[in-house]
Image (spheres, rainbow, N blue to C red):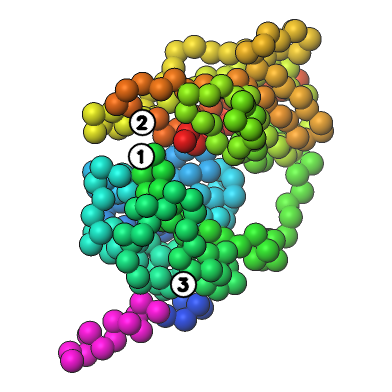
Amino acid sequence: MPRLLRSLPALLLAPASAAGIIGSSVTTTQIQQSAFCQQYTCGEPFVRGRDWQYPFTRYQGLTVTRESGEPGSRVVSVQLWVRNDGLNATADRQAFQQMQKLALGYVPYTGPVEPCYAAMSTRTLVKAPDERATGVTCELWDSTTDFTVNADPAYMTRTAPAPVTISSGPTKLNTWAFTTCVGAGGTNSYLTMGEAARCTLRVTTKGEQSAVVKAELQYEIEYVQNGQYVKKLLPEKELWLPGRAPGPLDPRLTQQGRAIDLNVSLAVKKVPGRRVTSVNTIARLTFANGAVKTAYEPLLVR
Protein backbone atom coordinates (compact mmCIF):
# COMPACT_ATOMS: atom_id res chain seq x y z
CA MET A 1 0.00 0.00 0.00
CA PRO A 2 1.42 3.46 -0.86
CA ARG A 3 2.71 5.40 2.13
CA LEU A 4 0.17 8.24 1.62
CA LEU A 5 -2.79 5.85 1.82
CA ARG A 6 -1.37 4.14 4.92
CA SER A 7 -1.04 7.50 6.68
CA LEU A 8 -4.46 8.90 5.68
CA PRO A 9 -6.46 7.42 8.62
CA ALA A 10 -3.93 8.83 11.05
CA LEU A 11 -4.26 12.27 9.48
CA LEU A 12 -8.05 12.17 9.69
CA LEU A 13 -8.11 10.88 13.26
CA ALA A 14 -5.42 13.14 14.72
CA PRO A 15 -5.29 13.68 18.50
CA ALA A 16 -7.79 16.02 20.12
CA SER A 17 -4.97 18.41 20.93
CA ALA A 18 -4.62 19.25 17.23
CA ALA A 19 -5.61 22.75 16.17
CA GLY A 20 -9.24 23.62 15.54
CA ILE A 21 -11.32 26.78 15.76
CA ILE A 22 -14.14 25.53 18.02
CA GLY A 23 -14.00 27.38 21.33
CA SER A 24 -11.28 29.70 20.03
CA SER A 25 -11.13 33.36 19.10
CA VAL A 26 -10.58 33.71 15.36
CA THR A 27 -10.75 36.35 12.66
CA THR A 28 -12.25 36.16 9.19
CA THR A 29 -8.71 36.35 7.81
CA GLN A 30 -7.66 33.26 9.78
CA ILE A 31 -10.64 31.32 8.43
CA GLN A 32 -9.97 32.44 4.86
CA GLN A 33 -6.36 31.26 5.25
CA SER A 34 -7.42 27.87 6.66
CA ALA A 35 -6.93 24.66 4.70
CA PHE A 36 -10.72 24.42 4.32
CA CYS A 37 -11.05 27.81 2.65
CA GLN A 38 -7.92 27.30 0.60
CA GLN A 39 -9.53 24.16 -0.82
CA TYR A 40 -13.03 25.59 -1.28
CA THR A 41 -12.19 29.26 -2.01
CA CYS A 42 -14.46 30.72 0.66
CA GLY A 43 -13.97 34.41 -0.14
CA GLU A 44 -15.29 37.21 2.06
CA PRO A 45 -18.05 36.14 4.47
CA PHE A 46 -21.57 37.46 4.72
CA VAL A 47 -21.76 38.83 8.26
CA ARG A 48 -25.14 38.21 9.92
CA GLY A 49 -24.92 39.19 13.57
CA ARG A 50 -22.88 36.47 15.26
CA ASP A 51 -22.66 34.41 12.06
CA TRP A 52 -20.02 34.43 9.35
CA GLN A 53 -21.40 32.71 6.26
CA TYR A 54 -19.22 31.41 3.44
CA PRO A 55 -21.21 30.00 0.49
CA PHE A 56 -18.47 28.28 -1.51
CA THR A 57 -20.44 26.38 -4.18
CA ARG A 58 -23.92 26.71 -5.61
CA TYR A 59 -25.18 24.10 -3.15
CA GLN A 60 -22.81 24.18 -0.16
CA GLY A 61 -21.80 26.73 2.44
CA LEU A 62 -20.01 27.14 5.76
CA THR A 63 -21.38 29.02 8.78
CA VAL A 64 -19.19 29.96 11.75
CA THR A 65 -21.18 31.17 14.77
CA ARG A 66 -19.52 33.09 17.61
CA GLU A 67 -20.54 34.02 21.14
CA SER A 68 -21.32 37.57 20.04
CA GLY A 69 -20.64 39.99 17.22
CA GLU A 70 -17.72 41.54 19.09
CA PRO A 71 -14.14 41.25 17.73
CA GLY A 72 -12.31 38.42 19.46
CA SER A 73 -15.50 36.51 20.25
CA ARG A 74 -15.03 32.73 20.43
CA VAL A 75 -16.53 30.17 18.05
CA VAL A 76 -19.51 28.21 19.45
CA SER A 77 -20.44 26.23 16.34
CA VAL A 78 -19.16 25.36 12.89
CA GLN A 79 -21.69 24.18 10.33
CA LEU A 80 -21.68 22.86 6.80
CA TRP A 81 -25.04 23.33 5.08
CA VAL A 82 -26.07 21.71 1.81
CA ARG A 83 -29.12 22.69 -0.20
CA ASN A 84 -31.49 19.75 -0.52
CA ASP A 85 -31.84 20.26 -4.27
CA GLY A 86 -28.10 19.66 -4.68
CA LEU A 87 -27.27 16.75 -2.37
CA ASN A 88 -24.26 14.74 -3.49
CA ALA A 89 -23.02 12.06 -1.12
CA THR A 90 -19.43 12.07 -2.37
CA ALA A 91 -18.99 15.85 -2.38
CA ASP A 92 -20.92 16.31 0.87
CA ARG A 93 -18.91 13.66 2.70
CA GLN A 94 -15.64 15.24 1.61
CA ALA A 95 -16.75 18.74 2.63
CA PHE A 96 -18.13 17.41 5.94
CA GLN A 97 -14.81 15.79 6.80
CA GLN A 98 -12.92 18.97 5.97
CA MET A 99 -15.38 21.01 8.05
CA GLN A 100 -14.74 18.74 11.06
CA LYS A 101 -11.02 19.22 10.57
CA LEU A 102 -11.50 23.00 10.52
CA ALA A 103 -13.59 22.87 13.70
CA LEU A 104 -11.65 20.29 15.72
CA GLY A 105 -8.33 19.80 13.96
CA TYR A 106 -9.21 16.19 13.17
CA VAL A 107 -12.12 14.14 11.78
CA PRO A 108 -14.05 12.09 14.38
CA TYR A 109 -16.78 11.00 11.93
CA THR A 110 -15.74 9.37 8.66
CA GLY A 111 -18.93 7.41 7.97
CA PRO A 112 -21.62 7.88 5.31
CA VAL A 113 -23.68 11.07 5.08
CA GLU A 114 -26.74 9.54 3.40
CA PRO A 115 -28.55 8.86 6.73
CA CYS A 116 -28.46 12.62 7.36
CA TYR A 117 -30.53 13.24 4.24
CA ALA A 118 -33.50 11.73 6.11
CA ALA A 119 -32.73 12.99 9.64
CA MET A 120 -35.99 14.76 10.51
CA SER A 121 -34.62 15.43 14.01
CA THR A 122 -31.08 16.05 15.18
CA ARG A 123 -28.95 12.93 14.60
CA THR A 124 -25.84 12.60 16.76
CA LEU A 125 -23.03 11.09 14.73
CA VAL A 126 -20.33 11.39 17.40
CA LYS A 127 -21.06 12.30 21.01
CA ALA A 128 -18.50 14.52 22.78
CA PRO A 129 -15.51 13.80 20.51
CA ASP A 130 -13.37 15.74 22.99
CA GLU A 131 -13.80 18.18 25.86
CA ARG A 132 -14.40 21.13 23.55
CA ALA A 133 -17.50 19.82 21.77
CA THR A 134 -20.87 18.34 22.74
CA GLY A 135 -21.03 16.39 19.52
CA VAL A 136 -20.98 16.11 15.76
CA THR A 137 -24.55 16.18 14.45
CA CYS A 138 -26.67 16.46 11.34
CA GLU A 139 -30.28 17.40 10.65
CA LEU A 140 -32.61 17.73 7.67
CA TRP A 141 -34.48 21.02 7.29
CA ASP A 142 -36.97 22.18 4.67
CA SER A 143 -34.33 23.61 2.35
CA THR A 144 -30.97 22.35 3.66
CA THR A 145 -29.25 19.45 5.37
CA ASP A 146 -26.96 20.75 8.12
CA PHE A 147 -23.81 19.14 9.54
CA THR A 148 -22.69 20.78 12.79
CA VAL A 149 -19.98 20.74 15.44
CA ASN A 150 -21.15 22.50 18.62
CA ALA A 151 -18.94 23.78 21.41
CA ASP A 152 -19.49 22.37 24.89
CA PRO A 153 -20.94 25.09 27.19
CA ALA A 154 -19.02 23.74 30.20
CA TYR A 155 -15.76 23.98 28.27
CA MET A 156 -16.61 27.50 27.12
CA THR A 157 -17.32 28.55 30.71
CA ARG A 158 -14.21 26.89 32.09
CA THR A 159 -11.91 28.46 29.51
CA ALA A 160 -13.58 31.87 29.30
CA PRO A 161 -11.16 34.80 29.44
CA ALA A 162 -11.19 37.01 32.51
CA PRO A 163 -14.33 39.16 32.43
CA VAL A 164 -13.91 42.67 31.15
CA THR A 165 -15.44 45.48 33.18
CA ILE A 166 -18.68 46.35 31.43
CA SER A 167 -19.63 49.39 33.49
CA SER A 168 -17.15 51.85 32.00
CA GLY A 169 -16.87 53.45 28.59
CA PRO A 170 -19.57 54.41 26.09
CA THR A 171 -22.80 52.44 25.77
CA LYS A 172 -22.42 49.44 23.45
CA LEU A 173 -24.40 46.31 22.70
CA ASN A 174 -22.81 43.29 24.34
CA THR A 175 -24.88 40.27 23.23
CA TRP A 176 -28.09 39.69 21.31
CA ALA A 177 -30.04 36.58 20.34
CA PHE A 178 -33.60 35.36 19.91
CA THR A 179 -34.70 33.35 22.93
CA THR A 180 -38.24 32.11 22.20
CA CYS A 181 -41.12 32.33 19.74
CA VAL A 182 -44.59 31.76 21.19
CA GLY A 183 -47.44 30.90 18.82
CA ALA A 184 -50.42 28.61 18.42
CA GLY A 185 -48.07 25.64 18.01
CA GLY A 186 -46.32 26.27 21.33
CA THR A 187 -42.95 27.72 22.31
CA ASN A 188 -40.00 27.21 19.98
CA SER A 189 -36.55 28.61 19.26
CA TYR A 190 -37.55 29.20 15.62
CA LEU A 191 -40.46 30.63 13.59
CA THR A 192 -42.88 28.12 12.11
CA MET A 193 -43.87 28.69 8.49
CA GLY A 194 -47.49 29.80 8.15
CA GLU A 195 -47.97 30.51 11.87
CA ALA A 196 -47.96 33.89 13.60
CA ALA A 197 -45.81 34.14 16.72
CA ARG A 198 -44.41 36.68 19.12
CA CYS A 199 -40.65 36.30 19.34
CA THR A 200 -38.30 37.80 21.91
CA LEU A 201 -34.93 39.28 21.00
CA ARG A 202 -32.79 39.58 24.15
CA VAL A 203 -30.12 42.30 24.00
CA THR A 204 -27.57 43.11 26.71
CA THR A 205 -25.36 46.18 26.92
CA LYS A 206 -21.99 47.17 28.30
CA GLY A 207 -20.37 50.49 29.06
CA GLU A 208 -22.44 53.33 30.45
CA GLN A 209 -25.88 52.08 31.47
CA SER A 210 -28.71 54.02 29.85
CA ALA A 211 -32.42 53.59 29.16
CA VAL A 212 -33.74 52.91 25.67
CA VAL A 213 -35.86 55.84 24.45
CA LYS A 214 -36.60 54.59 20.92
CA ALA A 215 -36.44 51.33 19.00
CA GLU A 216 -36.77 51.08 15.22
CA LEU A 217 -37.19 47.65 13.66
CA GLN A 218 -36.89 46.48 10.09
CA TYR A 219 -36.82 42.98 8.65
CA GLU A 220 -35.17 40.93 5.93
CA ILE A 221 -36.48 37.68 4.51
CA GLU A 222 -34.33 34.95 2.96
CA TYR A 223 -35.80 32.26 0.74
CA VAL A 224 -35.18 29.90 -2.15
CA GLN A 225 -37.55 30.05 -5.12
CA ASN A 226 -37.15 28.28 -8.45
CA GLY A 227 -33.68 27.22 -7.36
CA GLN A 228 -32.59 30.81 -6.73
CA TYR A 229 -31.51 32.22 -3.36
CA VAL A 230 -33.14 35.58 -2.54
CA LYS A 231 -32.42 37.98 0.32
CA LYS A 232 -34.92 40.84 0.47
CA LEU A 233 -35.08 43.86 2.76
CA LEU A 234 -38.71 44.64 3.58
CA PRO A 235 -39.49 48.37 3.32
CA GLU A 236 -41.82 48.61 6.31
CA LYS A 237 -40.42 49.78 9.65
CA GLU A 238 -41.84 49.41 13.15
CA LEU A 239 -41.36 51.90 15.95
CA TRP A 240 -41.40 51.55 19.73
CA LEU A 241 -41.55 54.60 21.99
CA PRO A 242 -41.87 54.60 25.79
CA GLY A 243 -45.33 55.46 27.03
CA ARG A 244 -47.06 54.62 23.75
CA ALA A 245 -49.76 51.95 24.12
CA PRO A 246 -48.86 49.17 21.64
CA GLY A 247 -51.40 47.57 19.33
CA PRO A 248 -51.75 43.78 19.16
CA LEU A 249 -49.07 43.46 16.46
CA ASP A 250 -46.78 46.29 17.58
CA PRO A 251 -43.33 45.69 19.08
CA ARG A 252 -42.95 45.81 22.84
CA LEU A 253 -39.83 46.60 24.82
CA THR A 254 -38.94 45.99 28.44
CA GLN A 255 -35.65 46.80 30.12
CA GLN A 256 -34.12 45.70 33.40
CA GLY A 257 -30.70 47.23 33.88
CA ARG A 258 -28.51 46.01 31.04
CA ALA A 259 -31.03 43.45 29.75
CA ILE A 260 -33.41 44.59 27.01
CA ASP A 261 -36.21 42.37 25.70
CA LEU A 262 -37.71 43.26 22.32
CA ASN A 263 -40.89 41.30 21.69
CA VAL A 264 -42.00 41.38 18.05
CA SER A 265 -44.86 39.88 16.06
CA LEU A 266 -43.68 37.77 13.12
CA ALA A 267 -45.34 35.58 10.51
CA VAL A 268 -44.26 34.08 7.19
CA LYS A 269 -46.92 33.16 4.65
CA LYS A 270 -46.67 29.93 2.71
CA VAL A 271 -46.06 30.64 -0.97
CA PRO A 272 -46.06 27.76 -3.49
CA GLY A 273 -42.55 27.02 -4.71
CA ARG A 274 -40.90 29.20 -2.07
CA ARG A 275 -38.87 27.89 0.90
CA VAL A 276 -38.25 30.62 3.45
CA THR A 277 -35.13 29.92 5.50
CA SER A 278 -34.72 32.97 7.70
CA VAL A 279 -36.28 36.20 8.92
CA ASN A 280 -33.62 38.69 9.99
CA THR A 281 -34.37 41.47 12.46
CA ILE A 282 -32.54 44.79 12.33
CA ALA A 283 -33.10 46.59 15.65
CA ARG A 284 -31.82 50.17 15.93
CA LEU A 285 -31.82 51.27 19.57
CA THR A 286 -31.53 54.87 20.73
CA PHE A 287 -30.48 55.42 24.34
CA ALA A 288 -31.17 58.33 26.68
CA ASN A 289 -27.49 59.30 26.66
CA GLY A 290 -27.57 59.76 22.87
CA ALA A 291 -25.95 56.46 21.88
CA VAL A 292 -27.48 54.71 18.86
CA LYS A 293 -26.65 51.02 18.36
CA THR A 294 -27.88 48.35 15.94
CA ALA A 295 -28.41 44.63 16.48
CA TYR A 296 -28.80 42.33 13.47
CA GLU A 297 -30.06 38.84 14.27
CA PRO A 298 -31.36 36.05 12.01
CA LEU A 299 -34.27 33.86 13.09
CA LEU A 300 -34.58 30.40 11.61
CA VAL A 301 -37.83 29.53 9.79
CA ARG A 302 -38.98 25.91 9.67
Asked if 81 appears above or below 236 in the picture, the reply is: below
Q: CA distance from mark 3 to mark 2?
A: 37 Å
Disc number at residue 275?
A: 2
- Badge 1: few (under 14), some or many (20 or more) residues near its Cα, within 10 Å? some
Residue type at numbered disc 2: Arg
- Residue 92, image x and y in percent? 28, 58
The residue singled out by tag 1 in the image is 143
Helix, strand, or loop for circle 1? loop
Of pointers 1 and 3, the one earlier in the residue sequence = 3
| Left or right for 186, reference 210 | left
Question: Which residue appears at 48% of the width and 44% of the height?
Answer: 51
Residue type at tag 3: Ala
Q: Secondary structure at mark 2?
A: strand
Amino acid under disc 1:
Ser
The span picked out in magenta is: 1-13
Q: Mark 3 or mark 2: which is in front?
A: 2
Residue at numbered disc 3? 19
Q: Residue at x 21, y 90 (%)?
A: 3
Give left or right: position of 151 versus 45: right
- Residue 202: percent from left, percent from top: 68, 34
Closer to us: 295 or 251: 251
The answer to whether the residues at label 1 and label 2 have Cβ atoms under 8 Å apart is yes
Q: Residues within 10 Å of mark 3 (few under 14, many from 20)?
A: some
Instruction: State the image coordinates of residue 144 (x, y, percent, origin top left).
Output: 36, 44
Foreground label between 1 and 3: 1
The structure residue drawn at horizontal position 24% and vertical position 33%, both measured from the top left corner, is 227
**Horizontal relation, residue 265 to residue 298: left or right:** right
Q: Quadrant of residue 147?
A: bottom left
Mark 1 vs 2, N-terminal side: 1
Q: Nearer the viewer, residue 286 or 63?
A: 63
Give the class, few, some or many, for how many residues have Cα within 10 Å of label 2's Cα (few <14, many ≥20). many
